[in-house]
Image (cartoon, rainbow, N blue to C red):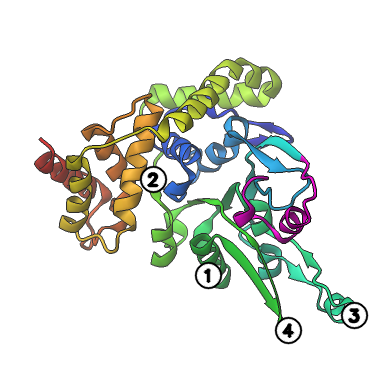
Amino acid sequence: MIMGKKIYPFAAIVGQEKMKLALILNLINPSIGGVLIRGEKGTAKSTAVRSLVDILPERMQVKDCECSCHPLDAEQACCDCLQKISNNEKLNVIKSKMRVIELPVSATEDRVVGTLDIEHAIKKGEKKFESGILAQANRNILYVDEVNLLDDHVVDILLDSAAMGVNTIEREGVSFSHPAKFTLIGTMNPEEGDLRPQLLDRFGLVIDVTGESETSQRVEVIKKRLEFEKDPKSFIKSYEYEQNEIADRIEKAKEILSNVVFDDSILETTAKISTDLGVDGHRADIVMLKTAMAIAAYNMRTEVLKEDLKEAASYVLPHRMRRRPFEDSKISIDMIVNKIEENIK
């Protein structure tokens, strides 16, 4: 958790291995499409997301650019960077880590999309834009706590931006656009209400978390929390080596990912289990394969195995299946595993 500027280390989180892996997989391959973490209060959901700060990978970006534009990607550049590129101006380039940008559940439309100064446009004949959260989120992680409580209109804006990778603002006949490609991470307590199906499907992965049930694990949670509160600086220092190990492993996995391959049986099974389980559309198939490839890369392999597909399916399919009333997610996951076993010998 955040205490001033002290952030609880990702490596110090007890248990919750599926949640931690889901977050890591999105760092390895952001095109997986983000993750929704559902669970009761006090299950380290927000702690895990905010603790990503210290293990996020570095990337090239234009210095002082509000959209964190990549200096070599003119197609995804904001207006300011594009103008400099067109004028053959030299871009100041820095290497910096991805960031976690938080979207408050009470955020207004203007705070999210930004604002256009119409008076300035009329008087000066030029657009003046003040960026919002979506500009800051470009090429970063957009984190929404209590995502199920977001205003419906803000949800629609997020859906549009997530689908198009662009944020467009229109006021009084004046329009402005900027890139808004982000990894969406949401957390929620199901007791406080459900999430709209359109937004639920937008998350590549969904994880359901519960509190630790083993006494020894619960004791460990208490001990570490109290140690952190007593001396956060020393506690963070004690996990520095493990934090660096995780960060290095993510970097290596990103390098391996482009070399990961799979045979036809993996591809056919991916498509078949989605069909057999009544999953709508093709997003699930694509995300399942991308997730399996990221799992293989994280395990330092260049070939997708049956076990990778099993694990990927448990993150990707349950929330997309047509579940019968009162049927729990454990039944859904068991059905998925059985389908994979039937199709991959």
Provide residue 222's location: percent of width, then percent of height.
52, 26
Query: Upstream in the sequence, badge 1 or badge 3?
Result: 3
The magenta stretch is 71-92
Q: Which mark is residue 123?
A: 3
Do the residues bearing badges 1 and 3 touch, measured as CB atoms within 8 Å? no
Provide residue 208's location: percent of width, then percent of height.
38, 46
Q: Which residue is mark 4?
A: 172
Q: Which residue is mark 1?
A: 156
Provide residue 43's location: percent of width, then percent of height.
47, 39
Furthest toward the bottom, the residue is 172
Q: In the rendered view, tell whether residue 154 sits above or below residue 275.
A: below
Furthest toward the front, the residue is 88
As measured in the structure, the alpha-carbon distance from the residue carrying label 1 to the one carrying label 2 is 22 Å
Q: In the rendered view, tell whether residue 23 sits above or below residue 198.
A: above
Q: Which mark is residue 207?
A: 2
Please state which amino acid type lies under the numbered disc 2. Answer: Ile
Query: Upstream in the sequence, badge 1 or badge 2?
Result: 1
Please state which amino acid type lies under the numbered disc 4. Answer: Glu
Q: Residues within 10 Å of mark 2 (few under 14, many from 20)?
A: many
Residue at horizontal 57 percent and vertical 21 percent from the top: 244
Please state which amino acid type lies under the numbered disc 1. Answer: Asp
Residue 264 showing in the rendered view? yes
Using the image as rendered, state which of residue 220 and residue 66 is in the foreground. 66
Q: Which quadrant of the structure image shows residue 118? A: bottom right
Secondary structure beneath disc 2? strand
Q: Which quadrant of the structure image shows residue 7? A: top right
